[in-house]
Amino acid sequence: MPPSTTGALVRLAVARATAAGIVIEPLLLRTGLTPCQIADRQARVDARGQAALLDLLADAVGDDLFGFHLGRDLEVREVGLVYYLMASAPTLRDALIRVERYSAITNEGIVPICLRTAEVSIRLNYLGLCRHAAYHQAEFWMTGLVQLVRHIAGRRLCPVRLALMHPRRATSDQMEAFVGCAIEFGALVDEIVFPADAGDVPLVCADSYLHDLLLDYCEDALALRTRPTQALRTRIENAVAPILPHGRPRVSEIALRLGMSQRTLSRRLAEEGLTFERILEEMRRDLALRYLQDARISVTRIAWLLGFQEVGAFTHAFRRWTGQTPSAARSGKRPGLCPNVSG
């Protein structure tokens, strides 16, 4: 079973786009989602379809910070049961620990990890989602988390560090102004860190009786759900993404990160009709097409982000993938993708 969400985020995104005059139905068809899923607040939504729809809606609206704006304007009670569990906790640290354990009730694609450090740290992992293709979703969750923390704490808490794996965009200063700290783009992980004393901040709606009641309810709800298995290809892409700008990843390195031998990884890929080289090349191609849409990212920087040591090597690879040079693709012509991409 693929990872899913309760659909709160996709409903917020659709409402924002509809208000901007965007016709939604054709975009839904491209992601495999249906109008009935959007209308039904009880329906669960495929997490991959949600991430894809966010990208399509952002392009349609013309908002490069679509995910951030959704998170900034989030009505935190839309989070549902997990929100009320967090809000009734005694302290902020207790609330964030609850997020780690019970987030799967409402969202299986995003896996928050509350790090056991002196500071209050939350790291986002991804299950069944290709992180490099979900930056609007990542920015929504990071921004929404800041919004949620401030709401339940009753004060404007600012993180001391916020890291995102995707590159900076020229408009990203709006995000920094909102969160109140510099954002580290191109990081190895998606992570938000609040100062150590923030963990002991008492929550304005703390209620021990309600909290204990909701804990029992959440345990029952969690017992009825099982984490979906993650496709091997997605696991590989998420392992490659943070190290790609530092050079061409080696299959032996990725196998180690996935906790298996290189031989086992190659065998499992062969069983699925895949190779590591094919996955890497298709991932590079998809990222190249995404980066080229932003004229503020130079071709030289794109080459570096994709792990190429020289612009010429990137240009040669891009021509092989699409039949065009990066400059020609950026000029406005839509690249015609080659049906088969190989190393």
Image: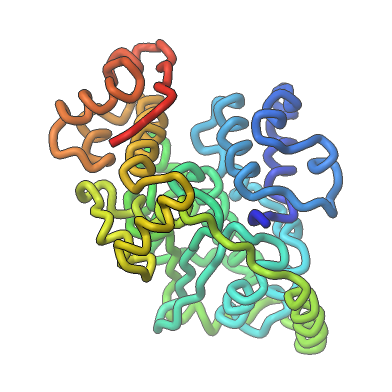
Compared with 245, 18 (above or below) is above
Compared with 117, 6 (above or below) is above
Give the image location of residue 298, x and y in percent: 25, 28
260 on left or right of 310: right
- Looking at the picture, the colour scheme in use is rainbow
Quadrant of res 14: top right
Q: Is residue 88 or residue 333 the one in the foreground?
A: 333
Q: Going 70% across and 58% down the picture, which residue do you hit?
A: 76
Compared with 25, 139 (above or below) is below
Q: Going 64% across and 69% down the picture, which residue do you hit?
A: 154
Quadrant of res 312: top left
Q: Going 59% across and 65% down the picture, which residue do you hit?
A: 150
Give the image location of residue 294, x and y in percent: 38, 27
Give the image location of residue 322, x and y in percent: 35, 20
Q: Going 68% across and 48% down the picture, which residue do you hit?
A: 46
212 on left or right of 277: right
91 on left or right of 332: right
Compared with 64, 320 (above or below) is above
Quadrant assignment for the C terminus: top left
Q: Is residue 135 or residue 265 the one in the foreground?
A: 265
Q: How many marks?
A: 0
Q: Is residue 104 or residue 116 the one in the foreground?
A: 104
Give the image location of residue 313, x and y in percent: 17, 30
Quadrant assignment for the N terminus: bottom right
